[in-house]
């Protein structure tokens, strides 16, 4: 009887672990669809703007129930950021589009951030890679990604 219960417990723990946490379909290390850029604190020009075309068939809600839209496995853009040691300047990531979009960022520490208003502000940014996705209701939606140290 205890053997059966432990198997059920292992199966239940395995199911809960698989059902929670970020989806494994997004690969923050994959080749970014619109390239990689390197920025250091105090970068110029500020803001730095990139026009992208969103894409993918994966539901962004799998990463965060607060996010809407479709994304691809690979990020739309990757930013290799070198933060200042002191004083730290913020890193602001924003996206604008005529469509209803969500902005998703995987930070250097592996944490995921989602914004349905198209703005994510890192008050004390870490050095490292920021993988960025823009989720839209349909693939091939044009969006303007803006990176700034001074904010919107």
Image (spheres, rainbow, N blue to C red):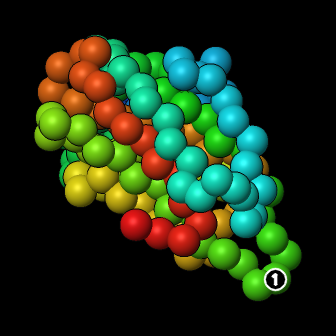
Image quadrant where residue 109 sits: bottom right
The answer to which image quadrant residue 145 occupies is top left
The one nearer the camera, 148 or 5, is 148
The residue depicted at 47 percent of the width and 69 percent of the height is 151
Percent across and percent down for residue 53 are: 36, 21
Q: How many marks?
A: 1
Which x, y percent locates residue 147?
Answer: 53, 52
Q: Is residue 9 above or below residue 137?
A: below
Position of the N terminus by quadrant: top left
| Above or below 107: residue 68 | above
Task: Indicate left or right for 140 with 31 as reference.
Answer: left
Vertical arrangement, residue 105 with respect to residue 59, above or below? below
Give how far across and how far down residue 142 sits, in percent: 29, 25
Where 22 falls versus 53 (above or below)? below
Residue at figure coordinates x 59%, y 66% from the top left: 149
For image coordinates 72% across by 58% down, the residue present is 43
| Left or right: 5 in relation to 65 | right
Which residue, as the protein is rendered here, is positioned at the far bottom? 87
Residue at the spot 40% in from the left edge and 53% down from the top edge: 94
Q: Quadrant of residue 55?
A: top left
Q: Is residue 32 visible to us here?
A: yes
Is 64 positioned to the left or the right of 91 in the image? left
Residue 112 visible, this orientation: no
Mark 1 residue crowding within 10 angstroms, few (<14) / some (14–19) / many (20+): few
Image quarter where the C terminus lies is bottom left
Judge by depth and name the residue closer to the eye, 22 or 59.
59
Q: Is residue 85 left or right of residue 4?
A: right
Residue tagged 1: 86
Q: As rendered, which of 69 and 51 lies closer to the eye?
A: 51
Q: Secondary structure at mark 1?
A: loop
Query: For the view shown, which residue lies furthest in the front direction?
Result: 45
């Amino acid at each position: 009887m205890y053997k059966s219960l432990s198997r059920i417990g292992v199966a239940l723990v395995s199911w809960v672990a698989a059902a929670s946490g970020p989806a494994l379909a997004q690969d923050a290390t994959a080749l970014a669809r619109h390239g990689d850029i390197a920025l250091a604190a105090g970068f110029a020009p500020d803001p730095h703007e990139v026009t992208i075309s969103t894409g993918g068939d994966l539901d962004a809600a799998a990463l965060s129930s607060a996010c809407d839209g479709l994304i691809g496995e690979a990020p739309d853009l990757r930013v290799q950021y070198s933060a200042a040691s002191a004083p730290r300047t913020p890193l602001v990531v924003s996206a604008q589009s005529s469509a209803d979009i969500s902005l998703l960022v995987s930070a250097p520490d592996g944490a995921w951030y989602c914004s349905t208003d198209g703005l994510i502000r890192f008050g004390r940014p870490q050095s490292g890679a920021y993988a960025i996705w823009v989720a839209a209701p349909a693939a091939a939606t044009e969006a303007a990604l803006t990176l700034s140290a001074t904010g919107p």
